[in-house]
Image: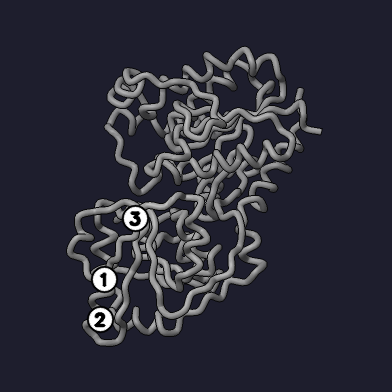
Amino acid sequence: MNKHRILYIVSYWTYNDPKSFVGALRPYKLNRFFRDRGWTTRLITPESSTGEESVVKEYKWMKTLAARIFPPDYTLFWSIRIVWQYYRRLRSRPGSCFLTSCPPNGLAIAGLLVKALLGNKVVWVLDLRDLWTRHPLYRPPVSKRLADPVIEKWALNKADLILSNTAWDHQHWKSRFPELAPKIHLVTNGFDEILQNRATGNLFVYTGGTTGGAATQWVENLLNSCRALETLDARCDFYGEWDTHMTTAVSVCYQGIIPNEEIPRLLTRYKFGFVYLPPGSESGGRVAQKLYDYLAAGVIPICFRPSEEMVRLFGELDTGIPVFETTPVREFIAKLQNARFNASPAQLNNMKRNVQFDYFYRLLNQIQPL
């Protein structure tokens, strides 16, 4: 049925780089999902990581010049190069789908150019994994701060489909652009499978980057405070990048770096999993990928400075412990003692990546080639 359909996925991030893995996870999984369902796919990246990519090389001058001068960001010239290289192929296959995975938001330029050159002959999907100009951590130079809102609005108007990956973001886009609501759809991130938890006792885990050691310090201080009250003698296993704070951290046991694909089953040995969000993340729809990984493994997430969307998820699932700077240690300990994993099988099933992607798959199948 779909042999005539081609899906081009533009991702600046690549899969096997630990620093960009989270950003690459969604486009790479989308590529495999559509390929398994009979579509021809092209995953366009600036370099090869797994061998499944169609590489469009990015030259250093492109990134340097765009980063310093031109909006929206350092991917501007690479985006132009993508369109230059793929224009003839897109023109020769009407009905092709062209998906840009943002951020970096400069990739939206590729979609805008494709629509300007080919119009309705190509379906452009603007996949927004995060907010743009309203992101709490958005801090560009003045020139870009003036231009970005114009480019953002232009992109949302020209895209044929707009995907958001959290309920908070989804409502954000619909309330800002109510006239575009019919083409704004929610396709969340998630996990591949639901796993059986095997934890015995109060075991703690942390996976991923430590945000310059800030996460290490927070976990260390929190667990030390619990120990000082003689109510909890706990250790946290850290998997991921090492930082210097681990040298003296009594409560942190560094376990090294493990392949990303092995993390889900490893997590089933733990009862609690820490999530650390940097300052400024409380307002908005940010959801760390490790939160989904924890839920898939039956691990109770403990999040410091959770976003509004994560607080909503904790309430909806009746699972998870939010922690803020003002949370008393005794209150945290009480929550630990009473914590249960209450997310239902139906709720978890809806969070499976393929369930979410299947909705997007049906949307694209409804758009017929010209």
Which residue, as the protein is rendered here, is positioned at the far bottom? 230
Q: Nearer the viewer, mark 3 or mark 2?
A: 3
User: What residue is shown with label 3?
Assistant: 256
Instruction: Classify the position of the N terminus by image quarter.
Output: top right
- What residue type is disc 2 on? Arg
**Residue 287 at least partly seen:** no
Residues marked 2 and 1 touching at CB (< 8 Å)? yes
Q: Residues within 10 Å of mark 2 (few under 14, many from 20)?
A: some
Asked if residue 72 lies left or right of residue 56, the reply is: left
Give the spatial CA distance, label 2 vs label 1.
9 Å
Numbered disc 3: secondary structure: loop
Residue 153 against residue 204 in the figure, above or below: above
* Cα separation between marks 3 and 2: 25 Å
Dot 2 or dot 1: first in sequence order is 2
In depth, the one of 289 and 324 nearer the eye is: 289
Q: Circle 2 is placed at which residue position? A: 227
Q: On the rendered image, what quadrant is the C terminus found in?
A: top right
